[in-house]
Amino acid sequence: MDEKLKTFYELYDRRRSVREFLDKPVGLDVLSRLLMTINRAQSAANRQPWHFIVVEKKDREELNQTLTKEGFRNAPVIIAACADPKEAWIRKTDKVNYAWVDVTIAVTEMIGAATAEGLGTCWIASLDAERVKEILGVPAHIEIVGLIALGWPAAELAKENKARKPLGEIIHYGKW
């Protein structure tokens, strides 16, 4: 395996959900690079049915009250990932709306970039979406997919030996 590939896979071995952050801001240059990965992410039919709200710690008093873990409140940045179902591609056969899929792809790519930058992230799904929308002034038709805590991790990002299902249980070839 060549070095670039090895580096890529090592990066994903280090990625983990971080719930404790240092009290150190994320520089605008780093944040800008991360936001560019969102902008370049793929989406069904290139519809890009997303909006992202970047909320720095200094502007988060009310939003912090909705977060269940203290560590998330200390993250220098919270990014609200939002889907616009009206802008998304819809599969014709069963009318599945791809807004959440597309937002998830964009966030996943940003999380990979954040890991490469040495930052930690955590996807926060346990939230009161309607309250978050109210606090952030999100229009009624927009859906909150999740909040992403972002910052410098309090502990080193190291490979986790978390139990994972064996590939034989989740991968199928040819048919189920």
Image (cartoon, rainbow, N blue to C red):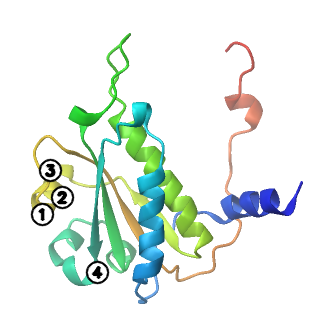
Number of residues whose C-alpha sits closer than 10 Å to that of mark 2, classed few (under 14), some (14–19) or many (20 or more): many
Secondary structure of residue under mark 4: helix
Q: CA distance from mark 4 to mark 3?
A: 21 Å
Q: Is residue 95 visible?
A: yes
Number of residues whose C-alpha sits closer than 10 Å to that of mark 4, classed few (under 14), some (14–19) or many (20 or more): some
**N-terminal-most mark, 4 or 2:** 4
Q: CA distance from mark 1 to mark 4?
A: 14 Å
Instruction: Please state, as top left, top right, bottom left or bottom right, where the C terminus lies in the image.
Output: top right
Number of residues whose C-alpha sits closer than 10 Å to that of mark 1, classed few (under 14), some (14–19) or many (20 or more): few
Determine which residue is flagged by label 3. 130
Vertical arrangement, residue 102 with respect to residue 150, above or below: above
The amino acid at mark 3 is Glu
Is residue 172 left or right of 123 when viewed as pictured? right
Q: Which mark is residue 57?
A: 4
Mark 1 near mark 2, Cβ–Cβ under 8 Å? yes
> Which residue is pictured at 48% across the width and 77% down the height?
30
Determine which residue is flagged by label 1. 135
> Which residue is pictured at 45% across the width and 50% down the height?
106
Q: Nearer the viewer, residue 175 or 38?
A: 38
Q: CA distance from mark 1 to mark 2?
A: 5 Å
Vertical arrangement, residue 39 with respect to residue 90, above or below: below
The amino acid at mark 4 is Lys
Determine which residue is flagged by label 2. 132
Is residue 131 left or right of 14 when viewed as pictured? left
**N-terminal-most mark, 1 or 4:** 4
Vertical arrangement, residue 136 with respect to residue 27, above or below: above
Instruction: Please state, as top left, top right, bottom left or bottom right, where the N terminus lies in the image.
Output: bottom right
> Which residue is pictured at 57% across the width and 60% down the height?
112
Mark 2 near mark 3, Cβ–Cβ under 8 Å? yes
